[in-house]
Amino acid sequence: MAAPHVIVIGAGSTGAATAHDLALRGLRVTVLERGEIANCTTGRNHCLLHSGGRYCVKDQESAIECIDENLILRRIMPDAMELNGGLFVALNEADLAFREKFIEGCEQCHIPYREVPVKRALEMEPFLNPGLLAAVQVPDGVFEPFRFCLAFLATARHNGAVVRTYTEVTELARAGQFITGVKVLDHRTGKTQEIGADLVVNATGPWAGRIAEMGGVEVPVAPTAGVMVTVDQRLCNLVINRMDKPADGDIVVPQRLTSIIGTTSWAILDPDQIEIPKAHIEKMIQKGRELIPAIQRRVTRGVGAAARPLIRKANTDEREVSRTFECFDHQRDGVDGFVTISGGKTTTARAMAEKAADVVCAKLGQRAECATRTTPLLSYRLFYN
Ligand SMILES: Cc1cc2nc3c(=O)[nH]c(=O)nc-3n(C[C@H](O)[C@H](O)[C@H](O)COP(=O)(O)OP(=O)(O)OC[C@H]3O[C@@H](n4cnc5c(N)ncnc54)[C@H](O)[C@@H]3O)c2cc1C
C-alpha cells in the first residue's frame, strides 16, 4: 500500500524542516511554496543561530529550545553555519546589574558561557564601544537562510519529496469535515490545479491565519513586524548583543561583509504590506552605534522588515510574547486532515518539524519515530542535482 500523502504549505524554515522529517519517516510529501524557497520571513531575518542567551532571563522555554537546537544543527548542517559565537556586552550600570540575572539564566537554561575580560573583548572586537564594562561569550552563530532551507529540502527530495515553488495555495479542498487537498495557482504557467492529500500541513509562518481561514478555522498567530538596518562593512566577527532583556536595536549580526542591526517589534495586520517607519531606521542606527560607534560613519546598504509568526496570548505586549511554538490539530476545531505549525524561530525549525510530524504520524497511523536529531542533512548544493 502506498504511504499516505502529505502536503506542506510553505517553504520557509518551518515547512522545509517539516518536509524533511515527514519524508524521513516514510511519508509521501509535496511542498507547495508561492514564491522562492525561504521567500519570506526566513530569508529576511538577522540569521542569528540563537544560543538562547537573548531569552534566558525572560523566556526560558524558548531559550532552552534554542540552545538544544543550536547544538543539534551544528552537527546535522555544518555547511550552512558560521560558528563565530556571540558576546553580550554591558555598557552602563543598568546592563551591569543585569549581568547576574543573565549568568543565572544561562545556567538555568544550560547555555555554555564564559566571562570575557574587557581588555580581551576589545582585542577580539576592536570596533566595540571602548567604554564597555563587562562581556560574556555564548555559542551564538550565523546561518545562511537559503542554504538552511535547501539542506532540509535536498534531503527531503532524496527521500522522495516533491518541491514546487511559485505554486500558491488558493483554496483548501474539503469533503464534509475533511480537508482532502488544495487548489493551487502555478505562477509560472498561470494554470490552476487541485492536488489531493491525506493531510495538509499549514507551515506558512505569519500567513498561517490566512490559510487556517481557508479551512474555516482560526489560529492565534499574530504577525509581528521587525525592522533591520544593514550597514556597509563587517564591524564585528561575533554577534554583539546588549546585556539586557530584548529591546529595539540591541543586536548587531555580522553577515558577509556587512553588519545587520536589529530590531523592532510591532503588530501588523497584513504580512505582505509592511510599511517601515522612518523612526525605526533612525533608532537602529542610534542604538546600534551605542554597541559599535563606527556604525555612525558607515553607509546604510539596506533597510528591511519581516513579520514574526508569534503565537498570541491575550493582552500580551509584542516583546513579552514567548518565542516558542505550537502545533494545532484542527480536528479539535471540527476540521480533520489539517494541522498548523507556527511560532518559533528559524533556529528551532527542526524541533517544530518534529512536533508537527509527531501529530501528523499519529493522525495517519504511521509508527515511524523522529530521526532528524541525528541524521546529517545532505549538502544544500544537492538540491539542484
Ligand atoms: C525581524 C526578524 C528577525 C528575526 N531574526 C531571527 C534570527 O536572527 N534567528 C532566528 O532563528 N529567527 C529569527 N526570526 C524568526 C524567524 O525568522 C521566523 O520564526 C521563521 O523564519 C519563520 O519561518 P516560517 O517558515 O514559519 O515562515 P516563513 O519563512 O515566512 O515561511 C512561510 C512561507 O509560506 C509561504 N506561503 C504563504 N502563503 C502561501 C500560500 N497561500 N501558498 C503557498 N505558500 C505560501 C510564504 O511565501 C513563505 O515562504 C526573526 C524574525 C523577524 C521578523
Image (cartoon, rainbow, N blue to C red):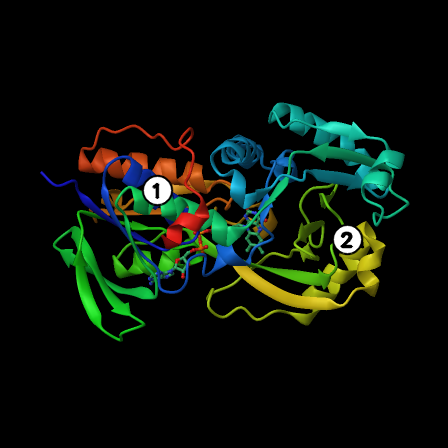
Q: Which residue is mark 1?
A: 20
Residue 180, percent from left and from top: 16, 53
Q: Residue at x 48, y 47 (%)?
A: 148
Residue 240, position in %: x, y? 73, 45
| Looking at the image, residue 352 lies above or below residue 272 | above
Residue 245 point in image, percent of width and height: 69, 42
User: Image point 63% across, 33% down: which residue?
Assistant: 56
Question: In percent of the image, x 64 and y 69: which residue is there?
Answer: 277
**In the rendered image, is residue 308 in sight?**
no
What amino acid is at disc 1?
His
- Which is more N-terminal, label 2 or label 1? 1
Residue corresponding to mark 2: 235
Query: Taking 385 as reference, is 140 left or right?
Result: right
Q: Position of residue 85 (x, y in %)?
A: 68, 38
**Mark 2: amino acid:** Leu
Mark 2 crowdedness (10 Å alpha carbons): few <14, some 14-19, many ≥20? many
